[in-house]
């Protein structure tokens, strides 16, 4: 009975805990573990970039080489999808890429918290970007922006149906952007927790099971490597889709 009580749910790691309760005119603005690790990601990103700020050597140090690699990856995303007009938006895109990357990587540290594993965060971020992109589109094209939902040469009888379909497919971008990041991070961390719990249970059982616990442990190490790759990939995909959606409103197709 005692061993059963010690078994925790793999979803317990995603629980949001209030650290500093705060209210402002009835609004809950408490500091939670999610807020704390977002601040950590922001500060660590700044610290990581500052490690490459050395002017006493002509040869770049290792930190600068890694930073330039991330910089070049982001620059290629912007260049391939936005072209020369993407230079204006590069600071935002680079900041977004770096912030998501560190949020994902920090979540891989044991006993930390994965900010991007919550749909409230990913949806809020995706919705903010979506609203900003639409504002940019309206500022760029004016009322012609709404022609995005009605291609040229469409027969009049199917105009209402086509506008509805185009509008729904346009709105779905917010959900696809947020759910993809949330689902990948949540499922990956849940699987790691389940495999780790299984290996620990076999080791605690003793006997022959303790010997064969090396099998789920080896699988766990392989999954950790895979999850690290997914952490970088999902930050890349989120940034890539943001640039694609931004290009859609800047240039009508």
Image (cartoon, rainbow, N blue to C red):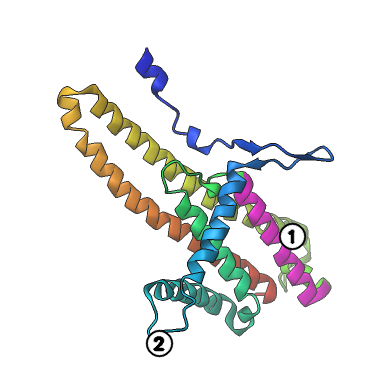
Above or below, 195 against 130 in this view is above
Q: Nearer the viewer, mark 1 or mark 2?
A: 2
State whether the magenta stretch is mostly helix, strand or loop: helix
Residue shown at the point (73%, 60%) measured from the top left: 131
Read off the residue under disc 2.
58
Mark 2 surroundings within 10 Å by alpha-carbon count, few (fewer than 14), some (14 through 19), many (20 or more): few
Q: Which mark is residue 163?
A: 1
Q: Residue at coordinates 41% horizontally, 55% vertically from top-left?
A: 230
Determine which of the numbered discs, if any, sits on residue 114 in the image: none
The residue at the point 73 percent across, 43 percent down is 29
Image quarter of the N terminus: top left
Q: Look at the numbered disc 2 and give the secondary structure of its residue.
A: loop
Query: Quadrant where the C terminus lies?
Result: bottom right
Say which quarter of the image contains residue 81.
bottom right
Find residue 163 and report its horizontal and vertical position in percent: 74, 60
Range covered by the magenta-colored residues: 120-142
Circles 1 and 2: CB atoms closer than 8 Å: no
Residue 243 visible (yes or no): no
Q: Residues within 10 Å of mark 1 (few under 14, many from 20)?
A: some
Q: Is residue 249 visible?
A: yes
């Amino acid at each position: 009975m005692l061993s059963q009580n010690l078994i925790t749910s793999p979803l317990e790691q995603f629980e949001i805990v209030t650290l500093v309760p705060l209210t402002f005119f009835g609004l809950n603005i408490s500091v939670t573990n999610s807020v704390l690790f977002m601040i950590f990601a922001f500060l660590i990103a700044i610290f990581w970039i500052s490690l490459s700020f050395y002017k006493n050597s002509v040869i770049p140090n290792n930190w600068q080489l890694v930073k330039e690699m991330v910089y070049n990856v982001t620059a290629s995303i912007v260049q391939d999808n936005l072209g020369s007009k993407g230079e204006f938006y590069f600071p935002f895109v680079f900041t977004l890429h770096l912030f998501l990357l560190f949020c994902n990587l920090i979540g891989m540290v044991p006993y930390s918290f994965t900010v991007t594993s919550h749909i409230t965060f990913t949806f809020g971020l995706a919705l903010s970007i979506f609203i900003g992109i639409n504002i940019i589109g309206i500022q760029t094209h004016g009322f012609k922006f709404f022609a995005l939902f009605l291609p040229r040469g469409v027969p009049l009888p199917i105009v209402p149906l086509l506008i509805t379909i185009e509008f729904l497919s346009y709105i779905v971008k917010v959900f696809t952007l947020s759910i993809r990041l949330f689902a990948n991070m949540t499922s990956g961390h849940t699987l790691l927790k389940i495999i780790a719990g299984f290996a620990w249970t076999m080791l605690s059982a003793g006997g022959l099971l303790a010997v064969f616990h090396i099998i789920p442990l080896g699988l766990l190490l392989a999954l950790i490597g895979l999850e690290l790759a997914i952490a970088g990939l999902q930050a890349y995909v989120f940034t890539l889709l943001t640039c694609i959606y931004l290009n859609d409103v800047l240039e009508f197709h």
